[in-house]
Amino acid sequence: LDSLARLCDEELRAELVALCGVGRKVADCVLLFSYGRDSVVPVDTHCLQMARRFLLPPAARDKSFGPALYEQISACFVDLFGPLAGWAFMTLFAGELADFRRRVAAAAAAAEEGGGPGGGGGSPLRPDKRQARRARLPTQPAPSSPPGK
């Protein structure tokens, strides 16, 4: 696979996708993490969710996920973050994980406080529905257009 490093992103992706069991997303992960192609964005379900909330125009937010939407999302990240688009996505992804950790901590705190009427229920990592609702942090509405545009 070292000999493939000289290829452009598109050619390298095509060679990787030709391997058994490798699809577009895995090929893009290999491009980003193993070949140092910093502008490549592996579009997965997390990337799709962020793009729908923050990047895509309203008309594109409800499109079904397929190759055309994959390309559109990737292009949005590259347009916004340039040659480091892949790492920008990974940073945003990590931020989303931090948000999840805060929510779990809030749910655990609610469980420790007795969970309100009727006692606790649930565990700190799997709170019951009432605890989860109380522990939710406020969310920001999706912007009407991509940031900086």
Image (cartoon, rainbow, N blue to C red):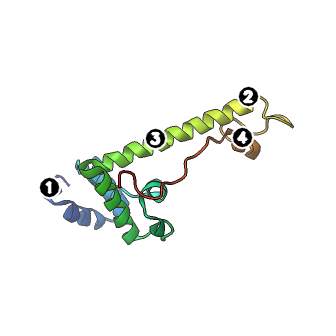
Q: Which residue is mark 2?
A: 112
User: Which residue sits at x=75%, y=39%?
Assistant: 122
Tell us which disc is closer to us: 1 or 4: 4
Residue 145 as seen in the image, left or right of residue 121:
left
Q: Which residue is mark 1?
A: 3
Compare residues 15 and 52 and report the one nearer the observer. 52
Residue 57, picture quadrant: bottom left
CB of mark 3 within 8 Å of CB of mark 2? no
Q: Earlier in the sequence, mark 2 or mark 4?
A: 2
In the current view of this chain or complex, which residue is farthest to the right? 118
Q: Earlier in the sequence, mark 1 or mark 4?
A: 1
- How far apart marks 3 and 2 lie (CA) works out to 26 Å
User: Which residue sits at x=72%, y=33%?
Assistant: 110
| Residue 44 coordinates in the image, percent (x, y) | 43, 57
Q: Which residue is mark 3?
A: 95
Q: Earlier in the sequence, mark 2 or mark 1?
A: 1
Is residue 65 shown above or below 113?
Answer: below
Tell us which disc is closer to us: 2 or 4: 4
Amino acid type for the residue under numbered disc 3:
Gly
- How far apart marks 3 and 4 lie (CA) works out to 22 Å
Residue 20, picture quadrant: bottom left
Q: Earlier in the sequence, mark 3 or mark 2?
A: 3
Tell us which disc is closer to us: 3 or 1: 3
Amino acid type for the residue under numbered disc 2:
Glu
Residue 138 as seen in the image, left or right of residue 146:
right
Amino acid type for the residue under numbered disc 4:
Arg
Q: Which residue is mark 4?
A: 134
